[in-house]
Amino acid sequence: MSYKIEPTDWLLRRIPNKPNFFVNGRITSACFKTHTGEDGLSVDIEKLVEDIREKYNPATHSLGEILAKLPMDEGYECRHDPIEGNSSHALIVGDTRKIAKKLARSCKLINPLE
């Protein structure tokens, strides 16, 4: 089943709880930059996640959400890219280093366990 991501869809990003990803409690652009050889930034489509708690282990990661509209408005394709064991997986296609700061500023941390 393929899903067409709309600008109003929320995309979830798992953020490792590492010092370089947080400064003064704020998310840094480092967690939104693609690396050499990657097809895009790995995210999950919130609407397709069956149990959000499976995506979240507070001991190792934080969980952030951004609207798909942001990368789409910047000319990026947001594409459903299911992988084995994760049918909600998607990509913000391409090199996201140019928009990493915008993604970090607009990302809202969420706690699905509350």
Image (cartoon, helix red, strand yellow):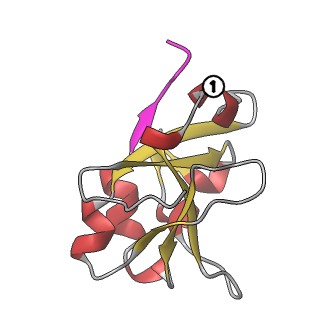
Instruction: Report the quarter where the N terminus lies.
Output: bottom right
Q: As shown in the figure, which amino acid type bears the numbered disc 1?
A: Arg
Image quadrant in which you'd find residue 47: top left
Q: Residues within 10 Å of mark 1 (few under 14, many from 20)?
A: few
Pick the front one: 21 or 90: 90
Is residue 56 visible in the rendered structure shown here? yes
Q: Which residue is mark 1?
A: 53
Query: Residue 73: x percent and y percent?
Result: 21, 73
Q: Is residue 24 visible?
A: no
Q: Position of residue 58 (x, y in %)?
A: 67, 27
Foreground residue among 87 and 109: 87
Span of residues in magenta:
108-114
Query: In the displayed structure, would residue 7 be above or below residue 85?
Result: below
Q: Nearer the viewer, residue 26 or 16?
A: 16
Q: Is residue 109 magenta?
A: yes
Write down the quadrant of residue 55 in the picture: top right
